Every structure is written in C-alpha cells, then in structure tokens.
Image (spheres, rainbow, N blue to C red):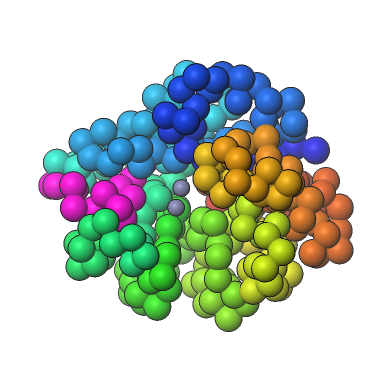
Amino acid sequence: MKLIDSHCHLDSEQFDADREAVIERALAAGVEHMVAIGSGDGPPDLEAGIRLADRYPPLYATIGVHPHDASKATDETYRRLAALAGHSKVVAIGETGLDYHYDHSPRDVQRNVFVEQMRIARDARKPIVIHTREAWADTIALLTEHWASSNLGGIIHCFSEGPREAEQALAIGFHLSFGGILTFPKAVGVQEAARITPSDRLLVETDAPYLAPVPHRGKRNEPAFVVETARKLAQLRGTEPAEIARTTGDNFRRLCLSMS
Ligand SMILES: [Zn+2]
Ligand SMILES: [Zn+2]
C-alpha cells in the first residue's frame, strides 16, 4: 500500500526533536509522499514547506498565507509567492481560505488575501489548498466567483462538512481531502460526505501534528497515521485500503503533478 499524505505541517516545532524519525516512520508505514504545507508562521517567511521539500526527497511543498496570518500579508508577500510558485517541488498554493472560528485576522482582510492568492495560483497554473472553518458560505461564494472558471481545481483540506456541502465543492471541481476527523465516532456528516464523494475526487491527509485519527486521538498526529484514515475510508465505502491508496494516489498525481 502506497499512500500520500496530502496535508501535513512537518515544519511545526512539535517535530523539531524527531522530524527525521517521523518521516522514516511514515515511509515504513507505506506513506510514499507527504505534502509539507508551507504556511508556517506566515509572512515574511513563505518557505517553510520548500525548505523541507528541498531537504527530504519524499516531500512536496505548498506555499501560501493561512487565513490566521492574513493581516501579515503585503504586496511584497504576493510578489514573493508568485516567484516561489515556480519552484519544482511546489505543487499547490495554500493553505488559504477563511477561518471565522478563530478570527485571528479580520474577516474582510481574510477575504482579500484569499482572493489575491487565487489570482497568484491562476497565473502560476497551480491548484489551491483550501482551509475553511465556520465560513462555508463565503468560501464557496469566493471560489465560485474567483476560481471555478480556472479549471485548475483544488483541495478542500480536512473536509469537515456534510454531504450537501460536499456536493457544492464537488460541483465547482474540488477534491475533498479527509483527515482524522473521519474516524471520530460522532462525525456522521463527514462520514456520509466521504461515502458519496466520487472516487476520482478523494484524497487523504493527516494535518499533522493536529487532529490525530482514532486510535491515536488526542496525541500528536504524524503522517504515518494517515493509514488509519485510509482504513476508515475503505470501511465506509465498502472497499479495501489498498484501493483507497491507489485511487487517492492517482488523484493526487493528476491534480498536483499534472500526471494521469
Ligand atoms: Zn487548515
Ligand atoms: Zn493545515
């Protein structure tokens, strides 16, 4: 079984003591690639993911400004993002989007910075990775207005909504990436969304170090644990984990590496 963890924060200080061992454990568990999300601590540092991907061959990277850090973005940030988008290991722009749960940046600033990053991704011909929390309606409205016509697609990372929202995201060309929440017993809406998502739109992720799947729930998450989410997804869809690994791997390569 060869899995791809489509979203993890390997730059997190929680991995400073054992990052190499974490990557080794993932490879040993069958995780052949990991996407190091590059939002880091936000601008001016936009290279948190690239630094890791340059160092560790199994890693890809993204670049982007997390909605939490939207108020740190400047014109220089956008120039830098546009320049870094051409790096050979950068597979997508993000995570970007809207977070109305924490509201670490004002909502109008979050929306502006989100739209700017869609423009950069469109110019770079790269997909986008979306973070959305308690902001579903605004997220879909902005994606519909500013992104859908690009036909570049993207990923709703850590998909945490229900089947109705899944349909909305699928209708504008998105892939849905399921993480540890899928394994939580009370996450029935997310589980139903995972059941109805077409197999060519599925991805899996950890969002490590956050949101570890059962049976690691509450502990530090790491890419090796994506196996548990793949297992749950297989169970929900009446298939085998190896089949989930094959289809999600194909989907990732088609979307992010432009391979079919
Ligand atoms: Zn996120
Ligand atoms: Zn994340």
Q: Is residue 136 above or below residue 256?
A: below
User: In the image, is 16 to the left or to the right of 147?
Assistant: right
| Residue placed most toward the observer, 192 or 258 | 192
Indicate the position of residue 123 as horizontal and vertical percent values. Answer: 31, 51
Q: Is residue 36 above or below residue 215?
A: above
Q: Residue at x 77, y 56 (%)?
A: 232
Indicate the position of residue 10 as horizontal and vertical percent values. Answer: 49, 32
User: In the image, is 9 to the left or to the right of 246?
Assistant: left
Indicate the position of residue 94 as horizontal and vertical percent values. Answer: 39, 49
* Tag count: 0
Q: Is residue 163 above or below residue 239?
A: below
| Residue placed most toward the observer, 238 or 134 | 134
Q: Residue at x 55, y 71 (%)?
A: 161
User: In the image, is 210 to the left or to the right of 134?
Assistant: right
Q: Is residue 159 above or below residue 171?
A: above
Q: Please tell me in which quadrant of the rendered image residue 84 appears.
A: top left
The span picked out in magenta is 63-75
Q: Is residue 89 visible?
A: no
**65 is within the stretch colored magenta:** yes
| Residue placed most toward the observer, 254 or 39 | 39
Indicate the position of residue 214 as horizontal and vertical percent values. Answer: 71, 50
Quadrant location of the N terminus in the rendered image = top right
Q: Is residue 34 visible?
A: yes
Q: Residue at x 44, y 46 (%)?
A: 92
